[in-house]
Amino acid sequence: MIIVLKNQTAKSDIDLFINMLQNRGLGVHVSTGVDTTIIGLVGDTSNMNEESFKAFDIVKTVMRVQEPYKMANRKFHPDNTEIKIQSPDGEITIGTDLQKNNKRNFTIMAGPCSVESEEQIISVAKEVKASGARFLRGGAFKPRTSPYAFQGMGCSGIDLLLAAKKETGLPIVTELMAIKQLELFDNIDIIQIGARNMQNFDLLKELGHCKKPILLKRGLANTAKELLMSAEYIMSSGNENVILCERGIRSFDNFTRNVLDLAVIPYLKKVSHLPVIVDPSHSTGLSWMVEPMSKAALACGADGILVEVHNCPECALCDGEQSITPNQFDKLVKSLQQYAKIENMVI
């Protein structure tokens, strides 16, 4: 249920109203816009009488939300969410509140699929930063289909990512696979939840108690609604810093590794206020497709991309076929910067 308050309602009256709602056992989510304050009620409102709320003088209108996701719903939060991360080079914003900014942010995250050595990760970090990446991505823990494949460096991989952060100042994005690993992520800037863990609900609820931004990847065969419900698990448990990630879904065709669902980007932007990132590397599995799919992501309204960059793809221990080189990444960023001017975006 959504309660829209009248314009210029005094803060003291809003606080009293919210306190009354909370005393009824309801969770309350407040969204304050330029002219409007919206109160979203989280919980079982099936027995709540809409007319009883309309009796309050400060209430303009009351609406029921049909969708099962509430806090991730744009009806609860009309303005786009901005997620801010501090770095040695200044504050980085993912997503754009169009009420406050004329230009949209397009954030580029780049780095190898897996951390393989100190020399490799620091070398790649320096090169992608020089080209325009704002975040360093890299896997320390790697979920693999085969139990015999390289599973990542684990704890030592985290240490090497932090060494690269110290060397370059780039904030880190890396994947968490299990609750027991969470204590190792104290200095990680964005926690990635991979496609296979998108519906690991115990893990998602635990992340709700963590204030770090969460990059939530869509599952291999999950609907957009299921992705939003997974975001709801995190948000309803207390952490509203969620970034959605489209990384491709399974289909009957196999000319690409997955099918990049570009149509889901404008859909998610319409129904949700959360930032949306596209992974053109995992979705296609082919390095030569990364550039055109990155351009497509920018054009259809994504808030950024997550790209795999390796200094020697043919030697990579994981996903070399979909990784681009630092030189190719530099070319990609320069190309995207030209497209960004047309789309009134900032990279």
Image: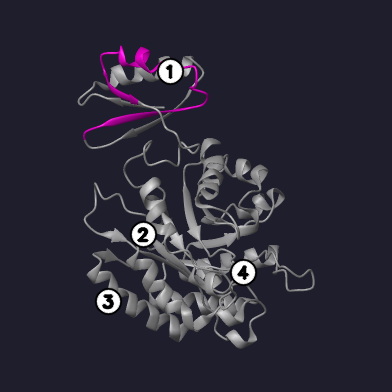
Q: Which mark is first along the chain, 2 or 1?
A: 1
Can you identify the residue that label 4 sits on? 160
Compared with residue 105, is residue 128 higher up or lower down, i.e. above or below? below
On residue 90, the disc is: 2
- What amino acid does circle 4 point to? Leu
**Residue in view at x 40 percent, y 63 percent:** 304
Q: Quadrant for the N terminus, please.
A: top left
Q: Which mark is first along the chain, 3 or 4?
A: 4
Neighbor class of circle 1 (other Cα within 10 Å; few <14, some 14-19, many 20+) is: some
Q: Quadrant for the C terminus, please.
A: bottom left
Can residue 257 be found in the magenta stretch?
no
Can you identify the residue that label 1 sits on? 21
Pointer 1 with pointer 2, Cβ within 8 A: no
Magenta highlight range? 35-62
Question: What is the distance, in whole Å, between disc 3 and disc 1 at their CAs?
Answer: 50 Å
Question: In this rendering, which labeled residue sits more in front, label 2 or label 3?
Answer: 3
Q: Nearer the viewer, residue 345 or 15?
A: 345
**What x and y, as percent, mark residue 102?**
21, 56
Can you identify the residue that label 3 sits on? 338
**What x and y, as percent, mark residue 42?**
48, 28
- What amino acid does circle 1 point to? Leu
- What amino acid does circle 2 point to? Gly
Instruction: Please tell me whether mark 1 sits on a helix, a strand or a loop.
Output: helix
Q: Which mark is first along the chain, 3 or 2?
A: 2
